[in-house]
């Protein structure tokens, strides 16, 4: 009964009362729209989305020019056929909302290709900020979507020092909130996970001006390091200290640090991944954490990126499974390849942590690398379904008392 221990002085009755009034957990799922270009069974588009799996779907990404003009980055995917589009991504997302009227769909402003320097320029200028806010709002109202997500990865981080971005980010959020909130629309953002980067936010004001903060509590390790490490350890490893490494690179530290800085727990979604980060080992007999590597792991058949594999690729590789009971995460090894990833067991523990800290839910990056076709025998969307079922289990067991 972890919850009761955690509640401390609160009475059970008071807790149950507050619980019955609280809404259920968020399951916020990003769709990385470039997945439509993946080959064969890796190809993913809106019709692959189960309208009842997630509470929120966030389309990644729409862009902004440096003068605050909304920029549809991929009209072929997003736009309707009569506007020169082909996949009609936005129209198909609207259809999902008619299948599930409770589903919320948001558009994410950002870019993974060129960083976010345009947003930095726009956020610094009150006229450009409002222009971008209105242009996004117009598009959102055309499709009856539910809000905007700001994916500024990251504010202040061009050179990892505090900059004008810190206050401009809050100004941007305030402007957006003043336009969106009166219309019942959401403003959410993806925010950093690593604590040096959390320091570069004005946490209290960021929290006050957002409806949800999706913490990027992953990518702690990858081929950008020169050793083997896990993409999203829940807890530290005793080997961190042996290797003189910073053991704050964990999901638990990230979440606890946002809370410590007074972010509203009821606005925090813990970010988890349906992908793994892979390595090519220097010596295939040394598969330990911190083992030396030669570089990134081999490309997968669908995602085709060195050092990155979708769960839908990982689950079909003939490989040896290992569980790290300190970090509470699995990895797999085959030949000279090593991949750290999330599976059903590690995700259940992350959901338990989310419930323990009374967060608002889980954010998932992303829909399109779960085993969405069910090719590995665990049904369709085994990872996101595990998250959903585990959250429901907690909700039911709290109601049942
Ligand atoms: C959890 O959140 C609810 C709703 O905001 C609140 O009433 C309750 O006190 C919180 N419990 C804890 C342990 O933080
Ligand atoms: C950033 O702005 C430039 C200049 O306006 C534009 O060419 C580019 O496409 C923008 N980037 C994004 C991601 O929208
Ligand atoms: C980095 O920091 C310096 C000093 O604050 C600032 O002038 C510069 O614009 C920042 N960004 C880049 C990309 O150098
Ligand atoms: C780990 O990182 C945090 C945040 O930057 C820092 O405060 C701490 O001193 C670091 N610890 C070690 C052992 O490097
Ligand atoms: C998987 O690998 C094991 C050990 O190398 C081997 O015995 C087995 O036949 C392989 N299975 C498949 C389906 O390739």
Image: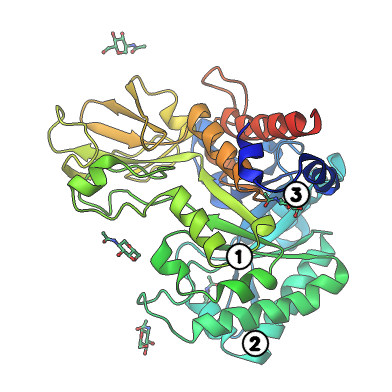
Q: Tell me the distance, in whole angstroms, between the alpha carbons under discs 3 and 2.
A: 28 Å
Q: Is residue 114 in view from this perspective?
A: no
Q: Residue 146 got which mark?
A: none
> Which numbered disc, 3 or 2, marks the residue that appears first in the sequence?
3
Mark 1 and ligand 1: say if the CB distance to the nearest ligand atom is below 8 Å: no
Q: Out of 129 and 233, give the one closest to the viewer.
A: 233
Write the residue at 75% across / 34% down. 398
Q: Residue 128 got which mark?
A: 2
What secondary structure is marked by label 2?
A: helix
Query: What color scheme is it?
Result: rainbow
Name the quarter showing ligand 4: bottom left
Residue 10 in picture, x, y percent from top left: 72, 48
Mark 3 and mark 1 in contact (Cβ < 8 Å)? Answer: no
Task: Give the image quarter of residue 128.
Answer: bottom right
Q: Is residue 101 in view from this perspective?
A: yes
10 Å crowding of disc 2: few (<14), some (14-19), many (20+): many
Foreground label between 1 and 3: 1
Q: Tell me the distance, in whole angstroms, between the alpha carbons under discs 1 and 2.
A: 27 Å
Mark 2 and mark 3 in contact (Cβ < 8 Å)? Answer: no
Task: Give the image quarter of residue 101.
Answer: top right
What secondary structure is marked by label 1?
A: loop
> Which numbered disc, 1 or 2, marks the residue that appears first in the sequence?
2
Q: Which residue is mark 1?
A: 263
Q: Residue 93 got which mark?
A: 3
Q: Tell me the distance, in whole angstroms, between the alpha carbons under discs 1 and 3.
A: 31 Å
What secondary structure is marked by label 3?
A: helix
């Amino acid at each position: 009964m972890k919850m009761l221990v955690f509640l401390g002085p609160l009475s059970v009755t008071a807790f149950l009362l507050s619980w019955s009034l609280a809404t259920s957990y968020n399951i916020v799922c990003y769709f990385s729209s470039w997945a439509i270009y993946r080959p064969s069974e890796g190809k993913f588009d809106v019709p692959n989305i189960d309208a009842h799996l997630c509470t929120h779907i966030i389309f990644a990404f729409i862009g902004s020019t440096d003068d605050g003009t909304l920029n549809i980055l991929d009209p072929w995917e997003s736009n309707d056929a009569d506007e020169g589009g082909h996949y009609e991504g936005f129209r198909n997302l609207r259809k999902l909302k008619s299948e599930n009227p409770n589903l919320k769909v948001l558009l994410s402003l950002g870019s993974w290709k060129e960083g976010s320097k345009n947003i930095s320029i726009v956020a610094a200028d009150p006229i450009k900020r409002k222009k971008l806010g209105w242009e996004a709002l117009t598009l959102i109202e055309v499709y009856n979507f539910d809000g905007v997500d700001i994916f500024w990865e990251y504010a202040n981080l061009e050179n990892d020092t505090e900059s004008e971005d810190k206050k401009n980010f809050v100004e941007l959020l305030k402007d957006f909130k003043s336009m969106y909130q009166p219309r019942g629309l959401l403003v959410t953002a993806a925010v950093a996970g690593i604590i040096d980067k959390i320091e570069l936010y004005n946490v209290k004001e960021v929290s006050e001006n957002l409806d949800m903060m999706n913490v990027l509590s992953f990518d702690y390790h990858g081929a950008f390091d020169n050793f083997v490490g896990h993409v999203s350890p829940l807890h530290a490893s005793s080997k961190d200290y042996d290797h003189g490494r910073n053991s704050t690179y964990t999901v638990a530290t990230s979440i606890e640090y946002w809370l410590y800085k007074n972010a509203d727990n009821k606005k925090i979604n813990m970010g988890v991944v349906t992908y793994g980060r892979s390595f090519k080992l220097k010596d295939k007999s040394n598969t330990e954490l911190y083992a030396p590597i030669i570089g990134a792991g081999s490309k997968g058949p669908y995602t085709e990126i060195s050092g990155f594999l979708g769960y839908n690729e990982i689950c079909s590789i003939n490989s040896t499974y290992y569980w790290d009971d300190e970090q509470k995460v699995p990895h797999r090894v085959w030949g000279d390849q090593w991949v750290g990833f999330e599976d059903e067991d590690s995700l259940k523990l992350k959901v338990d942590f989310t419930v323990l800290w009374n967060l608002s839910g889980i954010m998932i990056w992303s829909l399109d690398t779960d085993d969405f076709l069910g090719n590995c025998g665990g049904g369709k969307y085994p990872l996101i379904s595990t998250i959903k079922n585990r959250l429901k289990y907690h909700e039911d067991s709290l109601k049942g008392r």
